[in-house]
Amino acid sequence: MTLPHAWSPVPGGIRLRVRVTPRGGRDAVEGIGADTGEAPHLKLRIASAPVDGDANEAVIKVLVKWLGVPKTNINIVGGETMRLKTLMITGDPVQLLHRCQILVAPAAA
């Protein structure tokens, strides 16, 4: 499924596509990106190496802080062992979409 944005509403929350750069020196959200022929994604830089699930844990930690949701509300539903991941964030879809748009607005300018 190709999404017009890095996130889209789904029943009970939002679906979020992220591209992770492991061993990136720090944990941070770096804005929106899109590869040729791919749907847009949220770019994440993670200090952890992709070993024993450390990078996935770091991805969840970054998103917990970025979105202001509990860790239990974030689940990796696709691409667990890949750089391009799909996550399900449970909660009010309207609030989550609004938060995503506000948080990436400075990066888009």
Image (cartoon, grey):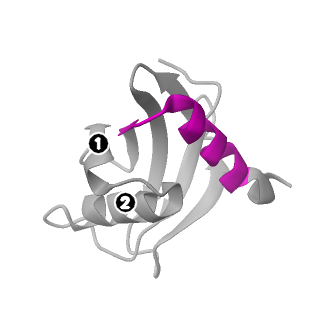
Indicate the amino acid at tag 2. Answer: Val
Where is 8 relative to 43, above or below? above
Q: Earlier in the sequence, mark 1 or mark 2?
A: 2
User: For the magenta stretch, what is the residue range?
Assistant: 88-104
Foreground of the two, 4 or 82: 4
Q: Nearer the viewer, residue 98 or 30?
A: 98
- The crowding category of the residue bearing disc 1, from other C-alpha atoms within 10 Å (few below 14, some 14 to 19, many at least 20), is some
Compared with residue 49, is residue 109 higher up or lower down, i.e. above or below? above
Asked if residue 29 lies left or right of residue 108, the reply is left
Q: Quadrant of residue 54?
A: bottom left
Question: Is residue 109 rendered magenta in the image?
Answer: no
For the question of whether residue 105 can be seen, the reply is yes
The numbered dot on residue 76 is 1
Mark 2 highlights which residue? 59
Q: Quadrant of the C terminus?
A: bottom right
Residue 78 seen anywhere in this rendered image of the structure: no
Separation (CA) of disc 1 from disc 2: 9 Å
Rendering coords of residue 63 (x, y %): 44, 57
